[in-house]
Amino acid sequence: MVRLRFSTLAINLAMCCALAAGSEDFIELIDRYEEDHQVVKGEWSKIATGIDIQRGRASRCIVAKKMPLDYSVDITFTRNSGDDAIAMVIPVGDASPSIEIGSWKGIAHGMSRVKGMTAKDPNNPTATRPGPIENNKEYRLQIEVSASGEGSKATVTARLNGQLVVEWQGDPSDLEANRNFKLPEKRALALAAYQGMVTFHSVKLCKM
């Protein structure tokens, strides 16, 4: 995996997560689920411990629209059954790639698609291999996106339980949606899973 150094982004993410509870821009999206969600595919429901997905092919649900160019998302989830990807569809400029955890039955964590490549592709520079996750274990996924800088460059980082698993810098035009996780509109944030039963316990959005 190609590693880039984004010290400023790392500091911003740490500060955002540390200060989130007192930030006016911090939002727990699960608290707003009933009014803001839009199911694209699958069986989704609000339960006492979060948002539940029943097993289904390429399930996805929009949890925020009209996203800012710079933001971070802090997610906790548990895959209850299945052996394939948990994903977050993220807007990066006008593109809608997905951060995929345990993709292709644990072959890799990564961003899909990058110049047409899925996380499985050996040439995808964002992939961390292998990328297994365990069922019935809670994970924390932290994602940061910055796309408001000068020129056409954007940056994306993702950490799973504190470990850097995705790091990318480039032109958003190099990114596109995974066809399994396409959304009906741009600038939307969505939860997704492939052939798995998943509970999302928390989805915290922080505008940078």
Image: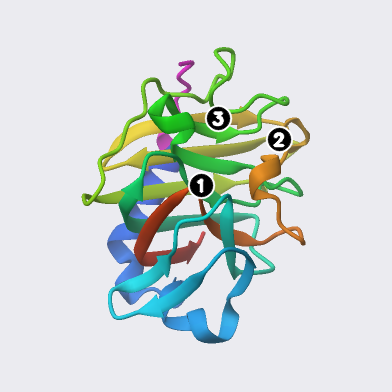
Label 3: element kind: strand
Q: Which residue is mark 3?
A: 168
Report helix, strand or loop for mark 2. loop
Outermost top residue? 123
Residue pointed to by mark 2: 175
Residue placed at 58% from the left, 46% from the top?
146
Q: Is residue 66 above or below residue 145?
A: below
Q: Where does the image place residue 127, in percent across and percent down from the top left?
A: 48, 24
For residue 28, what is the image quadrant?
Answer: bottom left
CB of mark 2 within 8 Å of CB of mark 1?
no
Q: 121 or 164, which lies in front?
A: 121
- In the rendered structure, which amino acid carries the disc numbered 1? Tyr
The residue identified by callout 1 is: 194
Instruction: Give the residue at x 27% y 40%.
Output: 162
Res 105 → quadrant: top left
Q: Position of residue 11 (x, y in %)?
A: 37, 44
Q: Which residues are magenta?
A: 1-7
- Residue found 28% across the figure and 60% down from its top: 18
Image marks 2 and 3: residues in contact by CB distance under 8 Å: no
Amino acid at the residue labelled 3? Trp
